[in-house]
Amino acid sequence: MAIVGGGNMGRALISGLLRRGMLPEDVRVAEVSPEAGASLTRDFAVRAGADTRAAIGSASVVIIALKPQDVAALLAPLKPLLSETRPVVISIAAGIRIASLQAWCGADVPVVRAMPNRPALVGAGMTGLFATPKVSRSARAAAAHVLSAVGEIVWLANEEALDVVTALSGSGPAYLFLLAEAMMHAAVSLGLEHEAARRLAVGTLYGAGVLAQASDGDLARLRTEVTSKGGTTEAALQMFAAADLSGTVMQALQAAAERSRELARQFG
């Protein structure tokens, strides 16, 4: 197993795979920062260094955990090696299309795109996955094994859906944090002590997520169960409706999805 990029998501994947039972000596990380590489070795006992070719040379699975703008420059020089060894290449770089990845890796290299989100850092991630029909069942299984180490996975029917996944679950934690932050500040303005407001906002965010996960997933029903007719929740929801919260959310996701498409055009 090789991971190219030892940032937050690379660290999350390493941690999840080691928790699942992978041995540290079976993980190699290509990381250009000496400080980051030393931290990975110290924290996880994996081999980390700046030599990408050495890291991926004998790997059956290669994870590309880089920013979109860095992927082409990294992969293109490695094309002869990847074409020879043909590992399963899993890219978690936002926006970069399969066609571009295939051109940089080699036509016969199985490529899978994945979009995990930040809760992967605590093993509670959501990841959308896509691969073209020519990618074998075993290669898909390898990708599923890796990404399920940090949370749940959802296979997608087409590549364009990954732009929506990026807008929904990839960026989604920031939207929820923003809402919780706004609730906290509003509570403070209404007279609640800051630390109490923070704890209540964070705890509510966590508890609502756990409750939704433990249920049948019917979000409308869950909302209705909290909303008593003529009660406090209904009063708040009426204000959200008057401010067209649903329309704002639609516009926000459209903007995020379009930015994902722009990244493909810019760096693909």
Image: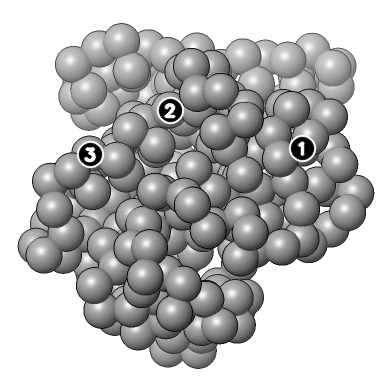
Q: Which circle's residue, 3 or 1, is located before the other in the chain?
A: 1
Question: Which residue of the protein is positioned furthest toward the right in this rendering?
Answer: 35
User: Measured along the vertical axis of the image, is residue 11 above or below residue 140?
Assistant: above
- Residue pointed to by mark 1: 40
Task: State the residue in front, 143 or 81.
Answer: 81
- At label 3, which amino acid type do we have? Ala
Visible in this render: residue 94?
Answer: yes
User: Measured along the vertical axis of the image, is residue 73 above or below residue 43?
Assistant: below
Circle number at residue 149? 2
Element at badge 3?
A: helix
- Residue pointed to by mark 3: 141
- Measuring 58% from the left and 37% from the top, which residue is drawn there? 27
Question: Which residue of the protein is positioned furthest toward the left in this rendering?
Answer: 133
State which quarter of the image contains the C terminus.
bottom left
Q: Which circle's residue, 3 or 2, is located before the other in the chain?
A: 3
- Measuring 42% from the left and 69% from the top, which residue is drawn there? 82
- At label 2, which amino acid type do we have? Ala
Residue 55, image x, y percentages: 61, 54
Element at badge 2?
A: helix
- At label 1, which amino acid type do we have? Leu
Residue 187, image x, y percentages: 72, 25
* Proximity of marks 3 and 2: CB atoms separated by less than 8 Å: no
